[in-house]
C-alpha cells in the first residue's frame, strides 16, 4: 500500500462514513488498559476494523543488551510483570471479540509492515515525551506511517493548567500552589468502550508472540517472602484487572488515611499504596486513582493521608510536565544546568553499588532488595541514589539506567525526574539532595530490622 493510502489526515479531519472501510492500528505503549484510555477509545470509535498491537522491541518495553554503562538485562521481575500485563490485556480484548497482537522488534520496522498487511490507514497511540519514545514516532513517520498520538498519561490535561507548559513554575511547590489556587479538577475517567471494531481479517494469520510461552521461558520463580510488592501473588500481579481490584481493596481499607504517617516505611505491602507498577504500565489510569481518592474523602472525610497521596500524584504530573517542557535536555548529564564539572564513571565502583557491595549496610540492603524483588521504597530509592551520586561520585544516568532495568514500576518520567532532582541537575531549588546514610539508618531503621532482613548487619 502506498503512503497516500496510509494518510490519516482524513481520519482526523473528516471521519469516514460508516460504510467506508477504515482499518486502524492501535499501538499500546504505557497504557495497557481498556478503561479511561482516550486514545484507544478514539481509535475504537473511528475504526471500522481495529488491530490492537504491542511491540516488545519498543522503548516502553524491555531492552536487552549493551548500554553505555555496560550490559543491562531487564530483570526477571520487570519482564514477568510486563508479560502478565499483556496477557491480561489480551484476555480483556478477547472477551470483547478482539485480541492483542504482540510482535518483536522496533516499532518503526514492524508497524509499517503490519499496517500494509492489514491495509490500515493510521496508527493511533499515546504520546510519550521522552527522547527514545519520541524518536520512535519520528521514525515511524519517516517510514511512511501516519501516526496519531495523544497525550493522556497525566492527571491534568496540559490545556487545563493555569500556566502554559512552557511556563511551568520552576519549583514544585510553586506549581502545586498554582494548581490549588486555580482549583483545577481532573476530568472523570472514561469507561471501557461499549464495543470494539472487529479485527482485520488479514490479521488472523499474523504471527503473535506467545506470551504464556514467554512467561514459561523465564522459568520458575519462587516467591520472595520479603517482597514489598509481591507481584507473584495474584493481588499484586501485573495487568488492569488486578490493578483495579487492588485500587478497590486499598481504598476500602484504612490505609489511605494513614498514608502520611507510614509513607516513609522501608518494607511491607502496606506502608505505601503500591500503585506504582500499574500506574507505570498504564494498567491503571491516574485519573482513576484520583477518583478513588475523591470517593474515599467523600465517604471518610478529608484527611492528611489522602491529601498527601494526591501530592505524590502531583509530583508524578510535575515530572511529566517537565519532560514536555524540556525534552531531551533532561537526558544529558548536566540536565538543566548550564555548566557542571565532568563526572567520572567508574565501572567497578558502579558494579559494587548495583550488586549491594559498597560496605554501607543500609545501601547494600536496599540494593539487595532491588535485585531480589524489583521494588524499593521511595525513601530507599532516595538514599541509594544519593549515595551513588554524592558519596561515590557516580554518574546519575548510570544509576537511572540500573533502575530502569530492575524496577517493576519503571516509569521514564518519574525515574528521570527523581534522579535529576537528587543529582541537582533538575529544578530543585536546593541544588540536589544529599542524604546522610547513617542518619537515614538511625531515623528509618533504628533497630536495624530492615538491614537484618537483607542480611547486611
Ligand atoms: P506511593 O508512595 O503510594 O505513591 C503513590 C503514587 O504516587 C506512586 O505510585 C507514584 O505514581 C507517585 N509517586 C510517589 N512518589 C513519587 C515521586 N517521588 N515522584 C513521582 N511520582 C511519585 N516511581 C515510579 O513510578 N517509577 C520509577 O521508575 C521511579 N523511579 C524513582 C527513582 C528514584 C531515584 C526515586 C527517588 C524515586 C523514584 N520513583 C519512581 C518514585 C517513588 O519512589 C515511587 O513511585 C514509589 O516508591 C512507588 O511506590 P508506591 O506506589 O507504593 O508509592
Image (cartoon, rainbow, N blue to C red):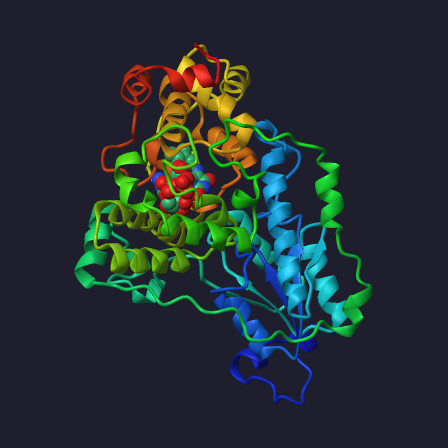
Q: Residue furthest right?
A: 205
Residue 254 in the figure: left or right of residue 362: left
Q: Say which residue appears at 31% left-offset and 23% top-offset.
A: 444
View quadrant of ligand 1: top left
Residue closer to the observer: 52 or 151: 52
Q: Where is residue 189 in the image (x, y as percent from the top left)?
A: 41, 66
Residue 408: x %, y % from top left: 53, 39
Which residue is located at x 38 percent, y 28 percent? 266
Q: Can residue 392 be seen in this view?
A: no
Q: In which quarter of the image is the C terminus?
A: top left
Q: With 445 as the anchor, is 239 left or right in this view? A: right
Q: Outermost residue toward the left?
A: 181
Q: Which residue is drawn at 57% across and 55% down?
A: 29
Q: State the image quarter where residue 420 is shown.
A: top left
Rendered position, 25 above or below 307? below
Question: Is 228 drawn above or below residue 56 in the view shown?
Answer: above
- The number of callouts visible is 0
- Residue 294 sits above or below residue 398 on the image: below
**Residue 309 at x, y percent in the picture:** 31, 47
Screen quadrant of the N terminus: bottom right
Where residue 259 appears, as percent x and y from the top left, is 30, 41
Q: Is residue 294 left or right of residue 389?
A: left
Say which residue appears at 54% left-offset and 85% top-offset: 14
Report if residue 151 is visible in the image: yes
Amino acid at each position: 500500500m502506498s503512503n497516500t493510502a496510509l494518510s490519516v489526515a482524513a481520519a482526523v479531519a473528516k471521519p469516514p462514513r460508516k460504510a467506508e472501510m477504515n482499518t486502524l492500528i492501535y499501538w499500546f505503549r504505557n497504557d495497557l488498559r481498556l478503561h479511561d484510555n482516550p486514545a484507544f477509545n478514539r481509535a475504537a470509535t473511528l475504526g471500522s476494523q481495529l488491530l490492537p498491537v504491542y511491540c516488545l522491541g519498543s522503548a516502553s518495553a524491555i531492552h536487552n543488551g549493551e548500554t553505555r554503562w555496560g550490559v543491562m538485562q531487564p530483570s526477571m521481575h520487570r519482564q514477568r510483570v510486563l508479560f502478565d500485563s499483556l496477557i491480561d490485556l489480551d484476555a480483556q480484548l478477547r472477551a470483547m471479540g478482539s485480541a492483542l497482537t504482540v510482535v518483536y522488534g522496533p516499532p518503526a520496522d514492524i508497524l509499517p509492515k503490519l499496517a500494509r498487511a492489514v491495509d490500515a490507514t493510521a496508527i493511533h497511540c499515546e504520546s510519550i515525551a521522552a527522547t527514545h519514545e519520541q524518536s520512535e514516532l519520528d521514525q515511524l513517520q519517516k517510514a511512511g506511517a501516519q501516526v496519531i498520538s495523544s497525550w493522556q498519561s497525566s492527571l491534568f490535561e496540559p490545556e487545563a493548567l493555569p500556566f502554559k507548559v512552557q511556563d511551568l513554575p520552576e519549583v514544585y511547590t510553586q506549581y502545586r500552589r498554582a494548581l490549588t489556587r486555580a482549583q483545577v479538577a481532573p476530568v472523570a475517567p472514561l469507561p471501557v468502550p461499549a464495543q470494539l471494531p472487529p479485527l482485520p481479517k488479514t490479521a488472523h494469520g499474523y504471527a503473535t508472540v506467545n506470551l504464556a510461552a514467554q512467561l514459561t521461558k523465564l522459568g520458575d520463580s519462587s516467591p520472595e517472602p520479603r517482597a514489598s510488592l509481591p507481584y507473584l501473588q495474584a493481588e499484586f500481579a501485573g495487568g488492569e484487572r488486578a490493578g483495579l481490584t487492588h485500587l478497590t481493596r486499598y481504598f476500602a481499607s484504612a490505609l489511605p488515611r494513614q498514608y502520611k504517617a507510614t509513607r516513609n516505611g522501608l518494607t511491607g505491602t502496606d506502608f505505601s499504596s503500591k500503585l506504582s507498577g500499574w500506574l507505570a504500565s498504564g494498567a491503571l489510569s491516574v485519573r482513576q486513582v484520583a477518583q478513588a481518592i475523591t470517593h474515599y474523602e467523600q465517604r471518610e472525610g478529608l484527611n492528611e493521608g489522602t491529601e498527601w497521596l494526591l501530592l505524590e500524584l502531583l509530583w508524578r504530573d510535575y515530572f511529566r510536565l517537565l519532560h514536555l517542557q524540556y525534552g531531551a535536555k533532561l537526558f544529558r548529564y548536566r540536565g538543566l544546568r548550564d555548566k557542571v564539572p565532568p563526572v567520572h564513571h567508574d565501572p567497578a565502583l558502579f558494579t559494587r553499588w548495583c550488586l549491594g557491595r559498597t560496605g554501607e549496610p543500609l545501601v547494600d540492603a536496599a540494593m539487595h532488595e532491588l535485585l531480589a524483588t524489583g521494588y524499593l521504597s521511595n525513601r530507599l530509592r532516595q538514599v541509594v541514589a544519593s549515595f551513588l551520586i554524592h558519596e561515590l561520585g557516580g554518574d546519575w544516568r548510570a544509576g537511572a539506567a540500573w533502575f530502569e532495568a530492575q524496577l517493576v514500576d519503571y516509569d521514564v518520567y518519574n525515574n528521570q525526574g527523581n534522579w535529576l532532582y537528587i543529582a541537582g541537575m533538575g529544578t530543585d531549588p536546593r541544588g540536589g539532595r544529599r542524604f546522610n546514610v547513617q542518619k537515614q539508618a538511625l531515623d528509618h531503621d533504628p533497630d536495624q530490622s530492615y538491614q537484618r532482613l537483607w542480611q547486611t548487619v
